[in-house]
């Protein structure tokens, strides 16, 4: 019968398991890092949306003010138009 040396076989398995364990750890760290980055990006997107809404409101107010000023400007007289 052939002798099976389990010591060498199990050493190789341990090495494979250690490599797999390290890769799983790296994957878990990367997933956590991506979660933090995603949360930061979501906060940034909310801040930008709020800033955008504020700017749109300010543009609308400026438009209303300019329109009100334009309405107050008297219409040109007929003599001025002919010149």
Image (cartoon, rainbow, N blue to C red):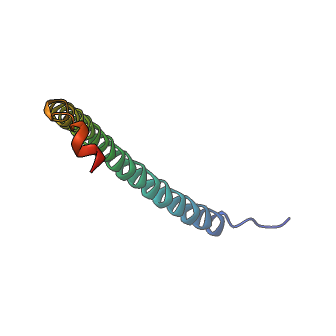
Compared with residue 82, is residue 22 higher up or lower down, i.e. above or below? below
Which residue is rendered at x = 58% and y = 63% of the image?
16
Which residue is rendered at x = 66% and y = 65% of the image?
9
Q: Quadrant of residue 35?
A: top left
Q: Position of residue 60 (x, y in %)?
A: 24, 33
Can you name the residue that lies furthest to the bottom here?
8
Q: Position of residue 34 (x, y in %)?
A: 39, 50
**66 horizontally vs 34: left or right:** left
Query: 73 or 14: nearer the eye?
Result: 73
Query: 52 or 57: nearer the eye?
Result: 57
Query: 31 or 63: nearer the eye?
Result: 63
Q: Position of residue 23 (x, y in %)?
A: 50, 59
Compared with residue 38, is residue 30 higher up or lower down, i.e. above or below? below
**54 horizontally vs 35: left or right:** left
Q: Quadrant of residue 58?
A: top left
Which residue is rendered at x = 19% and y = 30% of the image?
71
Q: Quadrant of residue 20?
A: bottom right
Which residue is rendered at x = 48% and y = 54% of the image?
24
Can you name the residue that lies furthest to the right here?
1
Compared with residue 49, is residue 20 higher up or lower down, i.e. above or below? below
**16 horizontally vs 34: left or right:** right
Q: Position of residue 32 (x, y in %)?
A: 36, 48
Q: If the image is split into quadrants, where does the N terminus sit?
A: bottom right
What is the total number of numbered labels drawn onto the structure image?
Answer: 0
């Amino acid at each position: 019968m052939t002798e099976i040396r389990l010591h060498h076989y199990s050493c190789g398995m341990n090495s494979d398991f250690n490599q797999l364990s390290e890769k799983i750890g790296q994957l878990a760290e990367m997933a956590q890092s991506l979660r933090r980055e995603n949360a930061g990006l979501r906060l940034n997107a909310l801040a930008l949306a709020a800033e955008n809404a504020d700017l749109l409101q300010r543009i609308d107010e400026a438009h209303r003010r300019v329109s009100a000023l334009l309405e107050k400007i008297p219409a040109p007289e007929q003599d001025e138009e002919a010149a």
